[in-house]
Amino acid sequence: MKDMHNSTNRIKYGEIAPEGIAILGDLEKYIKGSGLEPKLLELVKLRASQINGCAFCIDMHTKDARSQGESEQRLYGLSAWRETPFYSERERAALAWTESVTRIGEHWVLEGDMECFSKRELVDLTLAVIAINSWNRLAISFHTPPGSYLPDHPVTKG
């Protein structure tokens, strides 16, 4: 069995199946244009990545959130968001939904306090959770190394 952590053995899925990856890219473009708040989307992506243990995506979405002005305190507290006062009611609902959809095989999806989202927003939020879970599974399966990602944002463009 090949050592997938060795960069010479790593499958570069974007090069092997560019058409499939482009479909996920199109989903990301849709989500970005959905009207959901960019900071909320980064919290959702980061929380799902924490649950899934995706080092590459945790690195990426922490950097993306910081480049959008997210506070260190909120990023550090995200894995224990229920125990902190740092998140709005809408963010708490989105994080609960994210956890529920990400862990869908463990229990039924939360049917709770989602009144702060319209039906369209809830579908779009679910698509965002589906997308990040897909990216997590690709990055984890093919051992995408964390650390080299830089967000495309003025804050990071020295």
Image (cartoon, rainbow, N blue to C red):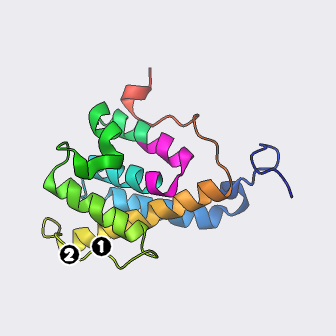
Residue 123 falls in which quadrant of the image? bottom left
**Viewer can see residue 56:** yes
Q: List x then y, in percent, for residue 125.
A: 31, 65
Residue kind at label 1, given as amino acid type: Val
Q: List x then y, in percent, for residue 149.
A: 54, 37
Residue kind at label 2, given as amino acid type: Lys
Q: Distance between the residues labelled 1 and 2?
A: 6 Å
- Closer to us: 140 or 152: 140
Q: Residue at x 16, y 69 (%)?
A: 113
Q: List x then y, in percent, for residue 89.
A: 14, 55
> Is residue 55 on the magenta stretch?
yes
Q: List x then y, in percent, for residue 150.
A: 50, 34
Q: Which residue is drawn at 42% across and 66% down?
A: 102
Residue at the extreme top of the image, as rendered: 158
For mark 1, what is the residue?
123
Q: Do the residues labelled 1 and 2 touch (CB within 8 Å)?
A: yes
Residue at the extreme right of the image, as rendered: 1
Prevalent SS, magenta region: helix
The image shows residue 120, relative to residue 63, as above or below, that is below
Q: Residue at x 23, y 68 (%)?
A: 121
For mark 2, what is the residue?
119
Judged left or right of residue 47, residue 35 is: left
Residue 112 falls in which quadrant of the image? bottom left
Secondary element at image label 1: helix
Residue 90 falls in which quadrant of the image? bottom left
**Which stretch is magenta?**
50-61
